[in-house]
Amino acid sequence: MKKEFKIIANLIEDQTRVLDIGCGDGTLMKFLEENKNVDARGLEISKNKVQNCIGKGLTVIEGNAEKDLQQFPNTSFDYAILSQTLQAFYNPEKVINDLLRVSKKAIVTIPNFGYWKIRLKLLIEGTMPVTKNLPDEWYNTPNLHMCTIKDFYNFTKKRGIKITQSLAVHNERATIITETNRGIKNLTADLGIFLIEKNNES
Amino acid sequence: MNNVKNLKTLIVKKPLILDCGKIINNYPIAYETYGTLNDRKDNAILIFHALTGDQFASGINPITNKKGWWSFLIGPKKGIDTNKYFVICANVLGGCMGSYGPSSVDTKNDKRLDTNFPIITINDMVNAQYNLLDFFKIDKLFSVVGGSMGGMQVLQFISNFPDKAKTAIPIACTASHSAQNIAFNELGRQAIMADANWKDGNYSKLNLSPNKGLSVARMAAHITYLSKNGLQEKFGRKLQERDSLKFGFDADFQIESYLRYQGSIFVDRFDANSYLYITRAMDYFDLTSQFKGNLSKAFEKSKTKFFIISFTSDWLYPTSENKEIVIALNACGADVRFTEIKCDKGHDSFLLDVPDFLDTIKKFLNISYLKK
């Protein structure tokens, strides 16, 4: 299992209700069910993956997060997970709003476009960066809205969203992002993981 | 229908108050079973058939001598494995394969009931079949499964008996019959009633049968079960055993010949009055309105694991209508899965050997059976 999933699992309390958006083959859902005793639900766009998940005994609905999140009532989950897919939506802001509507908290992970290798590729080669985490060319990438860790911070601040935990991942090692090290983490991490919730004061 | 004998039949003594207000009792429900009920009685699956189906879901249908309508799904080692599960399927109330319906004989005058048979609903069908649980002393079914009208019965069953099935698989159906659905059914009914042999439903007493009307009804309905692409691919503009157009009204095209054939074989196995009654029951089906516009209320008491399945090319009971059910289930926090199976064969897909469809049902049932 991906290290990212283990980090996500550590952010989730036992015996909670979890919605995994873009649950793929259900690896994370299964891990959470087995190790955290959660009630896990999945939303997945690929028919094949959905049918696979259902065959494994997972509760998964075929659908698209941009259209199908609206069917869930307010705060029907404790956690909504969005792993490396935010950048692929037409309207990421709407998806984030929906996440924080259907769930008390959300865990969002983003491939960090501020990572130094990406910056360097663009700077030196002058072409759109292709990396291990972002393997597609500009003309066939599903990623429409790439952002950096800093961008995500600024976005949450503007929209009154509270970040309760933020982690920078590099070489599968996670470190905590703080006010002071944010700039450097934005350069050295290839992945950002955020636990967010609505800012009750706003 | 004329040789409906030696069928397994449960005579239900308990009175049933129909939605129309009439009360029936001592009525027959014809059924068939496949596999063996285990000692724990936890492996029973109740299958609900669609409009023109019957209790012979698998094996060989003794009336038509053809394979059961879901024989590729139900059987040893199949999607619904009869080596593991005990499958029960009953002919619906209003049907013509041994259950109480318009072709049943009125004991008072020894004549067929025909249009004296009361108007029945999906709810009545489900309540009548529920008696099979008592008969087999099954406290809780492992699953209830059905497609099209069978799917509607699945939904109604869970709504009526929220804790009587561990899992439920409504396939290619709707919670509320649409105007288009009603329109197609009305077309079929009008075709039957326009046949001079229908005689206000008394054709049998006069040794007549409204075969032309019933076969036109079947032809029209059959088109709604297929997709445009499916038809085009199979028939296109191919001619029927001829090299050129004949400039007449014979079946020049293969599609015409195919539909005529479908109509002609249908009248041999189906009763015209049953067709009227069952289509009416479908039209009256509106689970949403039974719960004053809130479909979630139909399911909120149930802990059943739902698996909703639709097909990409089904325009009669489209994915959007199946999704309405998913949405209602999610709205009440029910345990629901959903997938849309890719298949270009239209509504009929659920009656065809579609590997993804069979495979996903098999896996879902098998893993759910293991889970407590």
Image (cartoon, coloured by chain):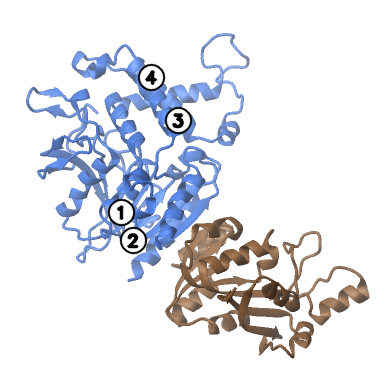
Chain colours: A brown, B blue
Amino acid bearing label 4: Ala
Q: CA distance from mark 2 to mark 1?
A: 8 Å
Crowdedness of circle 1 by 10 Å Cα count: few (<14), some, many (20+)? many
Crowding at mark 3 (Cα within 10 Å: few <14, some 14-19, many 20+):
some
Which numbered disc, 2 or 1, marks the residue that appears first in the sequence? 1
Check the residue under mark 3 and report the chain it is in: B
Q: Residue at x 45, y 54 (%)?
A: B326
Per the model, the C-alpha gap separating discs 1 and 3 is: 29 Å
Chain under numbered label 4: B
Q: Which residue is mark 3?
A: B222
Badge nearest the viewer, 1 or 4? 1
Q: Nearer the viewer, mark 2 or mark 3?
A: 2
Label 2 crowd (10 A; few <14 / some 14-19 / many >=20) = many
Secondary structure under tag 4 reads: helix
Rendered position, B208 above or below B178:
above
Q: Is residue A173 left or right of residue B26?
A: right
Mark 1 or mark 3: which comes first in sequence?
A: 1
Q: Which residue is mark 2?
A: B304
- Chain containing mark 2: B
